[in-house]
């Protein structure tokens, strides 16, 4: 019978401080910066690789979570378009 390697799982709960995104050949690598509750002056860096399928699934979940909280996820109209519309409304 093959010996199984049981690794200790650590769960970190804390606040998301920042993230970094880098491209790879088959997807992206996301590094999360998490400040653990009660931790002073430091943070954990957690890197994970996502392929295209995983990235789409994560995006869908984040969109659902945003909508459930009532947040708008549409991008803002570009500044030049807003200025142009405002000038047109003033002239007309």
Image (cartoon, grey):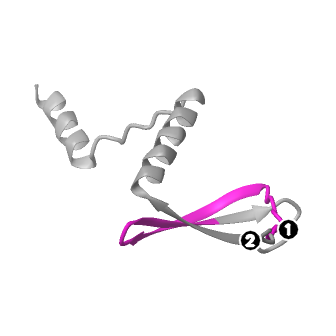
Residue 40 on image: x %, y %: 85, 71
Which quadrant would residue 38 be assigned to in this image? bottom right
Q: In the rendered image of this protein, does residue 54 appear above or below residue 85? A: below
Q: Which residue is drawn at the image coordinates 44% and 65% (left, top)?
A: 28
Whether residues under marks 2 and 1 lie with C-beta atoms below 8 angstroms apart, the answer is: yes
Count of numbered tags: 2
Image check: 1 left or right of 57? right
Q: In the rendered image of this protein, does residue 5 appear above or below residue 65? A: below
Q: Badge 1 is on which residue?
A: 39
Q: Nearer the viewer, residue 46 or 78?
A: 46
Q: Badge 2 is on which residue?
A: 43
Residue 18's disc is none
Image check: 78 left or right of 21? left
Image quarter where the C terminus lies is top left
Q: Which residue is drawn at the image coordinates 27% and 47% (left, top)?
A: 79
Image check: 16 left or right of 37? left
Disc 2/disc 1 C-alpha distance (Å): 7 Å
């Amino acid at each position: 019978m093959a010996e199984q390697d049981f690794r200790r799982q650590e769960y970190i709960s804390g606040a998301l401080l920042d993230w970094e995104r880098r491209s790879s050949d088959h997807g992206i690598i996301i590094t999360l910066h998490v400040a653990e509750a009660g931790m002073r002056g430091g943070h954990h860096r957690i890197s994970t690789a996502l392929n295209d399928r995983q990235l789409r699934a994560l995006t869908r979940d984040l969109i659902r979570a945003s909508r459930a909280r009532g947040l708008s996820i549409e991008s803002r109209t570009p500044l030049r378009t807003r200025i142009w519309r405002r000038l047109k409304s003033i002239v007309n």
